[in-house]
Image: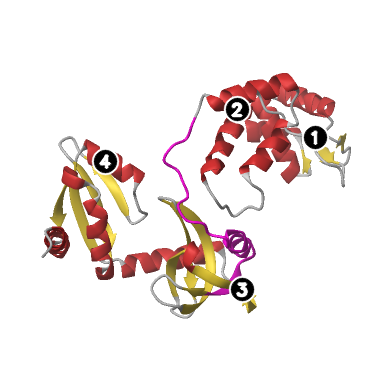
Amino acid sequence: MKKSERINQELFFFNEYKEFNLADLMNTFNISKSTALRDIEELERLGVPLYVDSGRYGGYKILNNSLLPPIYFNEKEIFAIFFSLQLLKSIIDSPFEHSYEQIREKLLQTFDDKKQQQITQAMESVRYEGITQIVAADNLETLFSSILKKQIVTFNYTRYENVKKKFLPIRLVIIDGFWYCSGLDLDKNAWRTYRCEFIEILEIAKNNTIKLTNEEIQTSLLAQQESYRDIDFKVKTTLLGKEYFLKHQFSNMQLIETASAIYIVGKINKSEINFLANYLLGFGEQIQILEPNRLKKEYLSLLERMFTKNNGN
């Protein structure tokens, strides 16, 4: 690890541990005593409010109610931050209040004119394509806040019919341009995922707290996935199919490569067979369905219905 990187990591370390000794620093960062002492001198020059504790066990302490100095980034790290922010340009809505342009301008203003020009030129040399939000979803900030606070919400879900939901949101994800929210449907006592643009009249529930740890949430989610998705499927594909899969994959499926073939495998529930058949149509000629037979039949039936429809019968 370079010295500049180590100094930044040590700042995070000090922010978490207000008291430490040289051995803590040496063991955490795998450095010698002399290097640890030099790092402490460097950090004091940067303004870290350290003082020596001459008590029984000795060591160092951070002064209370003191802000740590800013973290310093090298040029490559600065470019990486702005490249990451470029992703927000293609997303209409995000779980955060401020837009890409606001954040970008605020960060740019912290640099002198020459550095601003360098950053702008660098940004013009790299573009992100194929990551675009298709439909607006104006409830992401509330959902995100509820996730952090572990708050129960109520809403009307209008994708297929207008249904009232009582829901504990745990995750937001954007897939193929659509925002989804996963969580615990408290009426069904089951984990579900809903498209955010169909979540309407979103409100924080009156009795809005639930006592579930992160470990309990993950255990419950994994248990449901194992019991709910009880049908194995296997599809053989090609290199072109692999590329398509990597762009359009779901959490219940994975890629397996052998010396002679490439496979997509996973587990589904019987209610998801039609969805999977439609999904596999996107691979065109790059797939061969191996199992189960009911997936083959649904796929062929779907093709037949499409053929009949397009021939005007």
Q: Is 51 in the magenta?
A: no
Labels 1 and 3 touching (C-beta < 8 A): no
The answer to whether the residues at label 1 and label 4 have Cβ atoms under 8 Å apart is no
Disc 4 to disc 3, C-alpha distance: 41 Å
Q: How many discs appear?
A: 4
Residue segment shown in magenta? 127-155
Dot 2 and dot 3 residues touching (CB under 8 Å): no
Determine the CA span between mark 2 and mark 3: 39 Å
- Foreground mark, 1 or 4, reads 4
Separation of disc 2 and disc 4 at Cα? 31 Å
Question: Disc 1 residue type?
Answer: Pro
Q: CA distance from mark 2 to mark 1?
A: 21 Å
Please tell me the numbered disc located at residue 203: 3
In 3D space, how far apart are the residues under numbered discs 1 and 4 (Cα atoms)?
A: 47 Å
Residue at 45%, 52% (x, y): give it: 134
Mark 2 or mark 1, earlier in chain: 1
Quarter of the picture holding the N terminus: top right
Residue type highlighted by circle 3: Glu
* Earlier sequence position, callout 1 versus callout 4: 1
Q: Label for residue 293?
A: none
**Sequence order check: which comes first, mark 1 or mark 3?**
1
Residue 296 percent location from the top left of the image: 13, 59
Look at 25% across and 44% down and name the residue there.
Answer: 256
Q: Which residue is mark 2?
A: 79
| Callout 4–callout 3 Cβ contact below 8 Å | no
**x, y (%) of residue 239?**
23, 36
- Residues 269 and 87: in front is 87
Counting from the top left corner in percent of width and height, residue 108 is at: 70, 31
> Which disc number belongs to residue 242?
4
In the depicted structure, whether residue 203 falls above or below residue 104: below
Relative to 128, is 98 above or below? below
Task: Report the residue marked by disc 1.
Answer: 69
